Image (spheres, grey):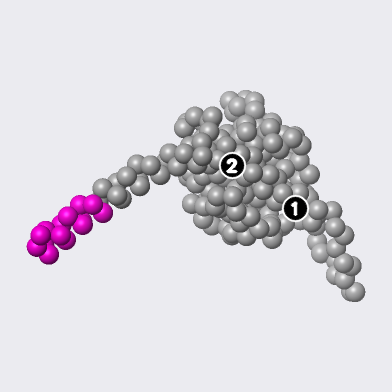
Amino acid sequence: MSAKKRFYAGLGVSFWVLTAIFVLLPSWPHIYYRLSPQASSLLASTIASTAAAASETVKSPSPTPLAPKPTPTPPKMALPEVDPTLPAENGLIIDKIGVRGQIHEGEDWQTILKQGIWRVPSFDTPPVNDRPIILAAHRWGYLEWSASFRKLNSFYNLPQLKAGDTIQIVWDQRPFEYRVYATETGTQITDYSANLILYTCQLWNSPVRFFVYASRLDK
């Protein structure tokens, strides 16, 4: 076989290999979960461990400065008007990445993460928001999730969010708007001044998370 024919043959093989990868990529979570049935539970426990670390951080007393300086208390933002046309269930909407899921409440993170988006209970809700609202969800989800449910309720595309992107929380039929100001990867939350924090796993069975920090927009 001539060098030219070998080149085109190799090019053809590479093309079909790449095609197979792109075809199988959306199905990889399903394959992975079938090979490792405990994967979802392990990932759920690591998501919960990040929430637990955050709760311990805010409980720990901060050292008192030697010469504290008074800081003005920012005025409370007015609550948005109730919109009866909005869903009665509290929900998260991120148009850029197609998320439109119900926010679930409770301490039983194992059960709740199977249902979609979890609000970490030791932190605030939109009407209060003296401390951050922290929302977590699986990036890949569970084998039994349908493709449509996964798109609406998982944080698979959370790493696509950038500073300037907007997020909406519907709470008690009130629309609360937020703007992303920072994102990062790491093992723990580093900025508790945010009004809203979202996070999910960055990689398979890894302690590294992807965090999104957002501030509420005063409308």
Vertical arrangement, residue 191 with respect to residue 139, above or below? below
Q: Amino acid at mark 1?
A: Ala
Q: Residue furthest left?
A: 2
Q: Is residue 24 left or right of residue 188?
A: left
Residue bearing mark 2: 39
Foreground: disc 2 or disc 1: 2
Residue 212: x, y in percent? Answer: 60, 53
Tell me where the magenta segment starts and ends, as one range: 1-14
Mark 2: give few (<14), some (14-19) or many (20+) Cα within 10 Å: some
Q: Is residue 4 magenta?
A: yes
Q: Is residue 176 magenta?
A: no
x 29%, y 46%: residue: 19
Q: Judge by depth and name the residue closer to the eye, 34 or 219.
A: 34
- Which numbered disc covers residue 54? 1
Q: Is residue 145 visible?
A: yes
**Quick one: SS at disc 1?**
helix
